[in-house]
Amino acid sequence: MIKIYVPRDSSALAVGADDVAKAIAAEASAKKISIQIIRNSSRGLAWLETFVEVETAAGRVGYGPIDAGDVKRLFAAKFYEGQKHTLCHGLVDEMPYLKNQERLTFVRAGITDPVSLVDYQAHGGFEGLKKALAMSGAAIVTEVTESGLRGRGGAGFPTGIKWKTVHDAKADQKYVCCNADEGDSGTFADRMVMEGDPFMLIEGMTIAGIAAGATKGFIYIRSEYPDAITTMKQAIRIATDAKWLGNNIQGTDHSFTLEVRRGAGAYICGEETAMLESLEGKRGMVRAKPPIPALVGLFGKPTIINNVLSFAAVPYILAKGGTAYKNYGMGRSRGTLPFQLAGNIKHGGLVEKAFGITLRTLINDFGGGTYTGRPVRAVQVGGPLGSYLPASQLDLPMDYETFAANAAMVGHGGLVVFDDSVDMAQQARFAMEFCAIESCGKCTPCRIGSIRGAETIDKIVAGENRDANLILLEDLCQTMTDGSLCAMGGLTPMPVMSAVKHFPEDFDKPTRIAAE
Amino acid sequence: MAKTHTLIDLKSGKADPAVAIAARYNNKPDALLEILHDVQHELGHVPEKSLPAIANALNISRAEVYGVATFYHDFHLKPAGKHMMCGAEACQSMGGRALLAAIEKLLKIKVGETTADGLVTLEATYCLGLCASSPSMMVNGRPMARVDAKKAKAIIEGLRT
């Protein structure tokens, strides 16, 4: 029986993976070749999707990008024996894109069937939870603190300190909430975890529950991720049936239940307090802090809120020890970050590397430059609230502190590459426009500032009192930064001001055209 | 303890369908988004006349239900087709703006509008998490990536047949 892998990640499904799987099954049956199709997760080689793999004696051989129309030719070339073909990439494990990564979190990505417990455990799954089940909450917190793990959602707050706060809080009920409202453009690592290795998230959240003494958890998944929702729900059912969730996990005294809740298209619900409101069935309005959610969180109870990637890093930390994780990285940014190469890039996808890697290495060595082949002009790092960096800053190492010192942020590790055809004034305007659309409306700098910001950029672009309006824009951005309740209004000035600072020529078009 | 209320439609004598949906979630107020999703899935939109029934079932005010139903971009109080175009930065870097303009032209509507036949509603979404395969769209709840004008045209024709 020949094993053929066709991914079920939505980046593959969105380019016809189901049709590819069907075509392979049909052709195999017509040719009377005995095959087994396994719907694995994605390796993160997005430009090669649909990426089909065949198991051979030497290892798995990859073919991509495969379209249903290519299948007959693949069979003619005997791809099912791992034979050569123009779309063949040889042994998957030897592909430089994968070989040069340091995958701690994405160690099973693309290798396993996402909803197979057997696969999960055969590849190191639940080792961390097994250890945690025998540890005290305080000992788990110490291990996580030792690892140096910081919140992967973007803020970079030390996870161990957050967990300790919830652990130390006295309450009749505590909660663990996973923020899976991955709304930042250019990010998809959370989605890949949920679609590709859902038990890892379940394991990480369960460990958090044991650490804090919380017995109930919620995963708040955005509605734009229908496949992640389906897969997570399925995985929760399977884990519950196998006693990895529910009462008396694996026969111990620990209990933890999980529930998936769908978002409804509001970007602001990625802000943790807005997410809590949404989980309580309310409008996603940001709460004022303090009190912090670790003390007064979901339904007013102490709550651990972490991003998908933070929870997903925890099983490794428990299994291999905090020190093993800490040995990766630079400065105060410890461990690895799954970077997401997106936008105008030749080889877009997921690259998990230790902190300290430069943008240039990510974009050129892994990404292969722009998709269009034109020069890179700008890179937006960290989502729609992240700065636009010019090509001259590509040598910055990915590190929370280095980026902060350069008025930028690492955020969730998403990189959106733009070539030289981009109009940066248009991008700056979009940042304001986006803030106006997605603001919860609670605080004035964000609600009104964003609209005034878009108007002011329009005036600048039209050449209307350009210099005065640029000063006004800067002043407005300062007000938004200082006066907004949360990161939505507070960080929108980052893309705007970075565009003004690094690409002033784009805000001076009428003058330039007149001069030409 | 929330009581189960049944609002009867006076004309048909039947309970509002939202009542049964709310009961599925034990009439828990924190499940309001889930309830609205299910209502929209089953009825095609969230009819304004169902809001009082939901409010009653969850023992919260109509204003609260209306507030939630209108806060989130997903919920439509009026019937709508389903068709979303990713409008965020990663797609912009790959010609998303031009593609959106081409789709507007094809459908003869602007973003936020519905075609005269009620089949297609064009909306911007931020974002579908397919940023390494931009531009992307969501059509009838299914994500599609590496969309160009030709593929978009085929998709739209597919919707119409």
Image (cartoon, rainbow, N blue to C red):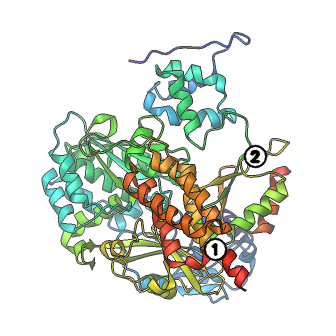
The residue where tag 1 is placed is: A423
Horizontal arrangement in the rendering, residue A261 relative to residue A292 (left or right) = right
Secondary structure under the numbered disc 2 in the rendered image? loop
The answer to whether residue A438 shows anywhere in this view is yes
Circle 1 marks a residue in which chain?
A
Is A156 on the left or on the right of A436, as rendered?
left
Q: Nearer the viewer, mark 1 or mark 2?
A: 1
From the top left corner, tell me how far across and down residue A256 is, in percent: 29, 43
In terms of depth relative to the viewer, which is nearer, A22 or A101? A101
Residue A239, percent from left and from top:
38, 49
**To which residue does mark 2 refer?**
B113
How many residues crowd mark 1 within 10 Å: few (<14), some (14–19), many (20+)? some
* Mark 1 → mark 2, Cα distance in angstroms: 27 Å
Whether residue A117 is visible, yes or no, is: no
Residue drawn where x is 71% and y is 68% of the image: A23
Residue at 62 percent across and 88 percent down: it is A83
Q: Please give the chain letter of the residue carrying mark 2.
A: B
Which amino acid lies under the numbered mark 1 shown in the image of this protein?
Asp
Q: Give percent across and percent down for residue A470.
A: 53, 67
Nearer-the-camera pick, A267 or A424: A424
Amino acid type shown at disc 2: Glu
As drawn, B147 above or below A212? below
